[in-house]
Amino acid sequence: MAHVQAHQFDHVTLIPQGTMPGFFLKTVSATFGIFMLLIFKPWKARNPRSRCYMGIGAFNLIRTSAYRAMGGHQPVALRPDDDLKFGKLVKDHGYRQDVLNGRGMVMVEWYRSVGELIDGLMKNMFAGMEYSVSLVIAATLAALLMHIWPWIGMWIAEGWPQAWYAVTVVMMVGSFGVAMAPFGVKSRHGLLLPLTIGLLVYIQCRSMVLVLWRGGIVWRGTFYELRQLKTEGRSG
């Protein structure tokens, strides 16, 4: 509250400290986090002139006056990624926003197993791509070419191409460690990047296929039609 009052922020969200069990799940969480950082650039959210935003379900502090003026949660009621889109709602209405590292203050056990993680992310990965098939295809190809192929090329290529692939992998692991160090993640976690990125790509593609096949999503035991989700998403 002192931070909010000192800088007159209307909305503050915290990136929580994850307590995922096991080395692999912790790396999956960190991999998901690094992509969120790259895509949404939360450090720019406090800049009123920037369109960057963030909202995290573990902690959202919002002024009552701003919350009521925005219509509460109603504009994002049918968004599986409502926490993230709530942050966008704040910026779209011109309110001041900040994102802080919640390590040591807010701890969340995201998922307890790989199965739980797959089931949990299945409902909102396609929503995060605005239900766009072309965006999913583009993101999948980019992940495969930029983040997984260098690991393969390092072993199957020869000469200078092999050396360049090796340098790319070293830089990838090193930058991963540096970027996630404030969140307690070590560089050695980056050695699992091809597996964790591959898993997230699988979840993203499977989420798209299932939503299109079913014509909607199952969320908290209720089926929601894709047509309705798209309509509410645009209006929100």
Image (cartoon, rainbow, N blue to C red):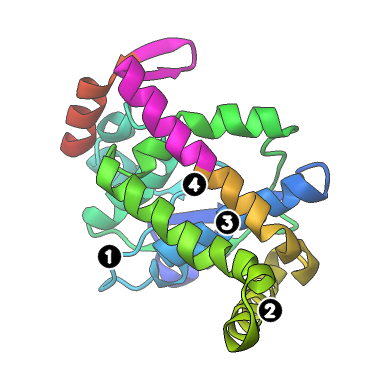
Q: Earlier in the sequence, mark 4 or mark 1?
A: 1
Q: Earlier in the sequence, mark 2 or mark 3?
A: 3
Q: CA distance from mark 4 to mark 3?
A: 17 Å
The picture quadrant where one finds residue 10 is bottom left
Mark 4 vs mark 1: in front: 1
Mark 4 vs mark 3: in front: 3
Q: Secondary structure at mark 2?
A: helix
Q: Residue under label 1, please give it.
A: 51
Residue name at image x 50 percent, y 30 percent? 122
Magenta highlight range: 202-223
Q: Residue under label 2, please give it.
A: 170
Query: What is the number of the mark on residue 33?
Result: 3
Q: Secondary structure at mark 4?
A: strand
The picture quadrant where one finds residue 132 is top left
Q: Residue under label 4, please give it.
A: 60
- Comparing 113 with 146, the one in front is 146
Q: Are marks 2 and 3 in contact (CB under 8 Å)?
A: no
